[in-house]
């Protein structure tokens, strides 16, 4: 009887141990798949966000430039009208109520600046999200017990490259940031 109890106890412990190991592997695999799906979804989202940012800024710039051009044309018409002294009252009314005022043009450029800043901030937040998903994935496949599970699954690191300008790349390479000139 005692031998039978010990035998069933060992089988029970072995079964619990086997279930724990198998569930660890399944948990690792499922978590890695979730991170992979999130990473690739966010990468696609980053592409869409960049495309949106580019188009919004380009189109708002076109509107501001068109308005600026209209304002310039209006000023030229007003100045052209000053060449002769006829119909002074009519000219005065036109000068006091031009179709496009400097304040309106200034407002458009201000809105353009705010749009650029907002779009860049949104893009930056998405880039941070990708970085965080990449970090969590690296922790999963490189820290124990995930590193042990990964010996069997051979899951690879993501191919993550942050978006950066040539200037930023040069600064990171050299460790020097001595460009203080505003290029406007």
Image (spheres, helix red, strand yellow):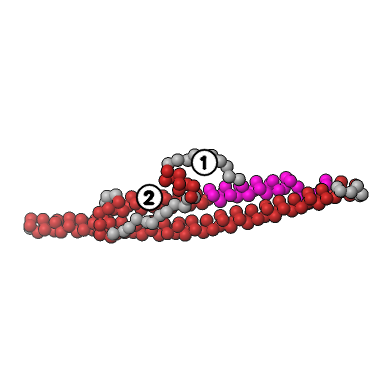
Of callouts 1 and 2, which one flags the residue occurring earlier in the amino acid sequence? 2
Residue at 28% x, 60% y: name it. Answer: 153
Residue 68 pos. (x, y %): 71, 51
Judging from the image, what secondary structure is the residue with disc 2 in?
Answer: helix
Q: Which residue is mark 2?
A: 135
Camera-nearest residue between 15 and 100: 100
Q: Main secondary structure of the magenta part?
A: helix
Judging from the image, what secondary structure is the residue with disc 1 in?
Answer: loop
| Magenta region | 95-121
The reply to whether residue 160 is visible in this rendering is yes
> Position of 128 compared to 83: left or right?
left
Residue at 32% x, 58% y: name it. Answer: 156
Residue at 56% x, 55% y: name it. Answer: 53
Residue 141 pos. (x, y %): 31, 53
Q: Is residue 176 above or below residue 162?
A: above
Camera-nearest residue between 17 and 165: 165
The reply to whether residue 23 is visible in this rendering is no
Residue at 52% x, 56% y: name it. Answer: 50
The quadrant of the image that shows the N terminus is bottom left
Residue 56 pos. (x, y %): 60, 55
Instruction: Check if residue 98 falls in the magenta segment.
Output: yes
Residue 91 pos. (x, y %): 87, 48
> Position of 5 compared to 153: left or right?
left
What is the crowding at mark 2: few (fewer than 14 residues within 10 Å), some, or many (at least 20)? few
Instruction: Check if residue 12 falls in the magenta segment.
Output: no
Q: Which residue is mark 1?
A: 179
């Amino acid at each position: 009887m005692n031998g039978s109890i010990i035998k069933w106890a060992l089988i029970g412990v072995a079964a619990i141990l086997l279930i724990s190991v198998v569930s660890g592997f399944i948990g690792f695999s499922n978590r890695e798949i979730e991170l992979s799906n999130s990473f690739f979804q966010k990468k696609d989202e980053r592409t869409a966000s960049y495309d949106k940012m580019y188009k919004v800024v380009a189109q708002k710039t076109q509107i501001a430039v068109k308005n600026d051009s209209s304002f310039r044309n209006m000023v030229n018409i007003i100045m052209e009208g000053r060449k002769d002294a006829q119909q002074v009252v009519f000219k005065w009314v036109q000068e006091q109520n031009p179709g496009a005022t400097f304040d309106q043009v200034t407002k458009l450029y201000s809105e353009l600046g705010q749009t650029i800043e907002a779009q860049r901030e949104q893009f930056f937040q998405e880039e941070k999200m990708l970085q965080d998903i990449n970090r969590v994935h690296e922790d999963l496949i490189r820290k124990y017990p995930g590193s042990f599970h990964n010996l069997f699954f051979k899951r690879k690191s993501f191919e993550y490259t942050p978006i950066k300008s040539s200037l930023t790349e040069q600064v990171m390479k050299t460790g020097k940031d001595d460009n203080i000139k505003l290029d406007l």
